[in-house]
Image: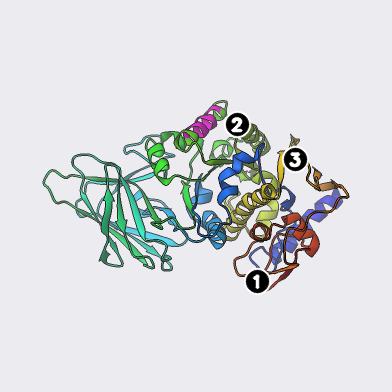
Amino acid sequence: MIRQKISLILFCLFFSIKGFAQKDSLYPSWIKQDYNYVYFQDSSHLKNSCRLMGDKGKSLTVLHIGDSHLQNENLPNQSRKLLQAIQGDAGIGLIVPFSTVKSYDARFYKSTHTGTWKYSKSYMGKFDYPMGVRGMTSYTSDSNATFKISFSQGVSSANNELVVFRHDNDSVFEMEFYIDDQPASIKYRDNEKVIYNVVGGFFILSFKAAKTQVYQKDITITGMILQDSLHRGGIWHNAGVGAAPYKMVLSEELYESQAKFINPDVVIIDLGTNDFLYYNRLEPELRQQIIKVIEKVKNANPTADIILTDSQEMKYKGKRTTVANQFSEMIYNLAIQYNAGFWSYYTVAGGKNAWRFWDAAKYTQGDGIHLNGVGSELKGTLLFHAIENSVTLIKSHHIVSKPFEIISDSLVSYEIDSLIADSSTTANINVVNETEKKVVKQNKTSKNHKKESASSFYVVKKNDTLGGIALKTKVPIAKIRKLNKLKSDLIKPGQKLKLK
């Protein structure tokens, strides 16, 4: 026990000096990369991801629903960058003029406003204004009201279309939008939304209410999207709302109609922190609330891949959230019941007592709950690679058929089996994790694989990921790791990787 505690302290000291943000560093040792997959019972549960991921220029739309871990864009923006590096850029996705709803800004844009604004946010107990998929609504009856969204860098040229969801009635103000002081032209409008043509590459998006008729008295904006009009590439919509629990989605009365318009290929439901953090218990009604959220998401987008996540173990007022593993088990069981994928961030992040490592390595904000920018980017990287890793498994004719079992705070096993009966290799991998010890057993047949790539080497390009290279070359990630003696999925431009 003493030796184990000393090892934990040494890990913390090492990674407080050498962090994830360094260019050539590996993932921290407490990250369980062997578990970083989206687990699934049937490959059809990730059908859209498999069909579209890695196909440059082909539309792949992700809707990421969550809480404060998402709102500031540190996490989803990292996943967005990684997706667009292999898929192409189809725009930013959902944006919010946060100052109008009295909330904190995103990492890469700031908002200001003039005039009087009121709002609804989905975590609130009382809702004065209807809410859509973004979970925040801005309302004003001030005909002189304005807001401005300023981007720290010019948005990419892919952002050539602005979609504004508005709650329609007979007395709404007209909306005037400006792109770097140039008026945006209306492309389409109906009772739910107005779509504007914009010229990508701008720094400032601004709004001004316009009262053109005496009977016009207010405007309610329930969401905004910046996107590529032709949907060429990947887009990762951030629908994170600080302090939001699962039931927040149930309060979004316009969710279904807006989600149908967004038409995501993948919906990630990344909630839970605010459901058990404060009282360190799972309330009896939580399971039914989660079921209702899953059903609502499926009703809106019945063909989308659904991915459920659990939550990292945290601390509240200095006390550890000991029910995080119970929450993980509940989400896993619901994923099986509702034919969804499952990403166990609880396990990948280190499982029981792992927060001490994140804290010591300065990946947290010091409040026991939130990751800082570097920590959030690490989580965003892990999430993207989890999806990518599973897609690679499926495309190389393997499936995670037995995701895992949860026993006493730890994931203790998973198996990867061949999808093809006459496949030359069947990998049966059993991973046991108990008090920081892992025993890995691999059984392989002696038959030789058919050659999967015409080239013996691959030179890593800028923005390449290991999963992306596996998709391009049709060589499984595990084989690339083994051939090149890689200790993590981190690679760098110019690196020469063996493929045979």
Q: Earlier in the sequence, mark 1 or mark 3?
A: 3
Mark 1 element type: loop
Q: CA distance from mark 3 to mark 2?
A: 18 Å
Which span is picked out in magenta? 288-296
For label 3, the residue is 410
The residue carrying pointer 1 sits among few (fewer than 14), some (14 to 19) or many (20 or more) residues within 10 Å by Cα, namely few
Asked if 451 appears above or below 410 in the picture, the reply is below
Q: CA distance from mark 1 to mark 3?
A: 36 Å
Q: Nearer the viewer, mark 1 or mark 2?
A: 1
Q: Is residue 465 left or right of residue 107?
A: right
- Classify the position of the C terminus by image quarter: bottom right
- Judged from this view, the residue extending furthest toward the left is 214
Q: Could one spot residue 369 in this view of the protein? A: no
Which quadrant of the view contains residue 364?
bottom right
Colour theme: rainbow
Q: Is residue 189 left or right of residue 242?
A: left
Residue placed most toward the observer, 301 or 332:
301
